Image (cartoon, rainbow, N blue to C red):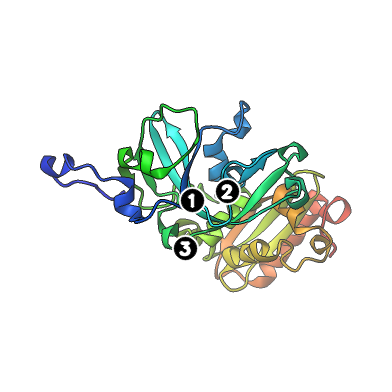
Amino acid sequence: MIPLCVNMVDCKIMIKLNDILTIDDFSDFRIRFVLSWGNESEQNPLERYRNDPDDPMRHYLWKGNKATGFKVGTKVIGLIRLAGDNWLLTHVLEITAVNDVPIAAALPTIDEQLNYWYNAEPMEKFTKFFGRVIVNFHNTSQNLIRRPETVIDAMEVVEILSNNFSDRDFPGYANVTITWYQLHQIISRNNREWRTALQNQKGIYLITDTHSGKQYVGSAYGEEMIWGRWQAYVLTGHGGNEALKKLPFEYIKQHFQYSILEIADGKSSDKYIFERENWWKRALLTRTFGYNMN
């Protein structure tokens, strides 16, 4: 965490959100507050952000049956409520297109009833703040899309996290069970703790298809070991595995889960790793009922 004041005199000085963003002209900007995705626990926006930092973008950009006031060129500052009056800055986006196609046509996992949506791109100059800046703001309006000039001066920065809010601590090899989106987040952010743990260990890993129940046993022994092998799954989905190539990438993103079955010292022979990989394939019957083809 970066301290925002050094002594009691400094602490009396309010640091506002725009002291950090330094936006000169708000005419094209809107602030989008997100309280919830609904009443179900799995719809908690904060947990969804932890699982997939890009997920809030889909909610910010939901158009529904009518326009929300955005147009091409509108910049959207996205804030998710943490607790009480504290909010997490997760995105600053620029609208690039207004779509007239159902959202389900582009995102098949999203319910058809969500109807229409916007295309947008993150604004590069603000990305270093995504998931790190926490502001305090007492929202008294039911309107969750606001003009910045009416509220931003009341947004006090209370904390700047040293790491992204969605970053996850490495739980230990025996406790790794992560989704594709979580893996993507770890790899794309080059999470130092995870990289240190995974790039120095050879090992046997398990991929589980949570929709069909099928499993795939793989081994990692090459450059950067488990970290390097899992990078390939983030980039392609299939990692070069023939059976997985038959699956759509979007399916893999939605349904694949990654865990570690066994680790070995980086000095262990490749022959030993192959033997352990084959043992796990026999034990879990992944050649008969899973995705292993060899």
* Left or right of residue 74: residue 220: right
Read off the residue under disc 2: 57
> Is 149 or 60 nearer to us in this picture?
149
Which residue is at 74% across, 52% downward?
A: 106
Disc 2, disc 1: CB below 8 Å? Answer: yes
Neighbourhood count class around disc 3 (C-alpha, 10 Å): few under 14, some 14–19, many 20 upward: few
Q: Residue at x 75, y 36 (%)?
A: 113
Q: Which residue is under mark 3? A: 124
First of labels 2, 3 by sequence position:
2
Task: Give me the residue at 49% from left, 51% from top.
Answer: 91
**Within-10-Å neighbours for mark 1: few <14, some 14–19, many 20+:** many
| Circle 3: residue type | Glu
Q: Residue furthest front?
A: 27
Residue 259 in view: no
Mark 2 and mark 3: Cα distance apart in space:
15 Å
**Label 1: which residue?**
91
Q: x and y percent of residue 37 in the render?
A: 60, 34
How packed is label 2: few (under 14 Cα within 10 Å), some, or many (20 or more)?
many
- Circle 2: residue type: Met
User: Which one is nearer the viewer's eye here, 225 or 8?
Assistant: 8
